[in-house]
Image (spheres, rainbow, N blue to C red):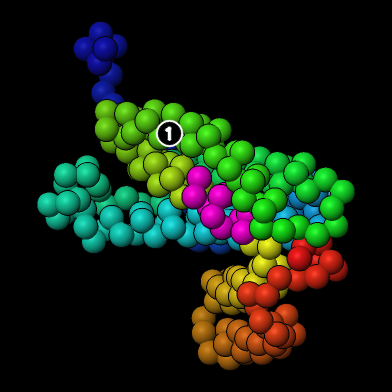
Amino acid sequence: MEAALGQEKSLSKVVRFAPQIAGQTRNRAVFAIVLALAAIVSYLWLRFGTKEYGLAAIVALVHDVSVTLGMVALCHFISDTVVGKALLLDAFRVDLPMVAAILTVIGYSLNDTIVVFDRIRENKGRIEALNPKIINASINQCMSRTLLTSITTFLVVLVLYAFGGAGVHGFAFALLIGVVVGTYSSIAVAAPLLYRPKLLHVVVVLMIVLGLAGIVVELTPGGGAARWIPCGIIAVVGAYALMRVGRGSAYAPAGRVAGVT
C-alpha cells in the first residue's frame, strides 16, 4: 500500500494523559464502586426484607474479588517456575481486560448468591426465624443447578484460556478463578452468614474500616499527619463499632430482631 500511494508512515498525533486526569479517573472509580455496593445492599434489603441479605452478598463479593486479585498477584512469583509454565501462567497485570474479568466475576457471583437467597426465602415462607435446616435444604436444592452452570462456564473459559491467545489470556485466567471462587462463596460464605448475623456485622465493620483506611491512604497526597490522623480516627471509630457489634459471642445465632435465629 505504501508503494502504491507513494507515502511513508508518519506519526501524526501523540495523546498524553496528565496525572491529574488519572487521579480524577481513580476518584470517580472509587465513588462508583461505593455507590454500586450501596445500591446492591439497598436492592437486596428491599427484595428480601432484611439488610443481612445485602451485607452477606457484599461480603461474598469482596471475598471473590480479593481471592481473584490475590491469585493474579501470585502469578508474578510463580509464572517462571515449572508449575507456572505447566499451567500457562504469565505475570498478569491489572489492565482493562482484567478489570472486565473482575466485573464479570462480580456479576456471576452475585447472580449465584441471589439464586440461593431466593430459594432460602421461598423455603422460609412465613416462619419468623431462620434455622440451619432451611439453609441446608435451600443450598441442596440449588446445588445441581449451581454446579452444572459453573462447570459449563468453567470448561468454556478453560478453552479460551488455553487457546485464546495472549490478548485474552489474563481475562480468561481471572474468569477461571472467579467462577470457582464465586460458586464456592455463594454456597459456603454468603448463605451460612445469614444464620450468624452478629458475625456478619463484625466482618462488615472490619471491611468498612479497612476500606476507608485504604481510600484515605490512596487519595491523600503526600504523607504525615494529613494521612495518618484520619486513619487513626477511622481505627478508633471502628474499634468502638466492633465493641458495640461484637457484644457476646459473635458465633451465637441472633434473635428475631435480625430476622434469624
Q: Compared with residue 16, is residue 153 higher up or lower down, i.e. above or below?
A: above
Residue 146 percent location from the top left of the image: 54, 37
Residue lying at 58% horizontally and 43% vertically, measured from the top left:
140
Residue type marked 1: Ile
- 81 with respect to 229 (left or right): left
Q: Is residue 184 magenta?
A: yes
Residue, far left? 82
Q: Residue sitting at 44 percent across and 58 percent down?
A: 67
Identify the residue position indicated by label 1 in the image. 151
Magenta residues, as a range? 183-192
Give the image location of residue 48, x and y in percent.
Answer: 80, 49
State yes or no: residue 108 in magenta: no
In the rendered structure, the answer to whether residue 137 lies left or right of residue 254 reads left
Q: Nearer the viewer, residue 95 or 123?
A: 123
Above or below, 17 against 235 in this view is above
Residue in the foreground of this view, choosing between 157 and 30 = 157
Residue 161 place in picture, x, y as percent: 32, 35
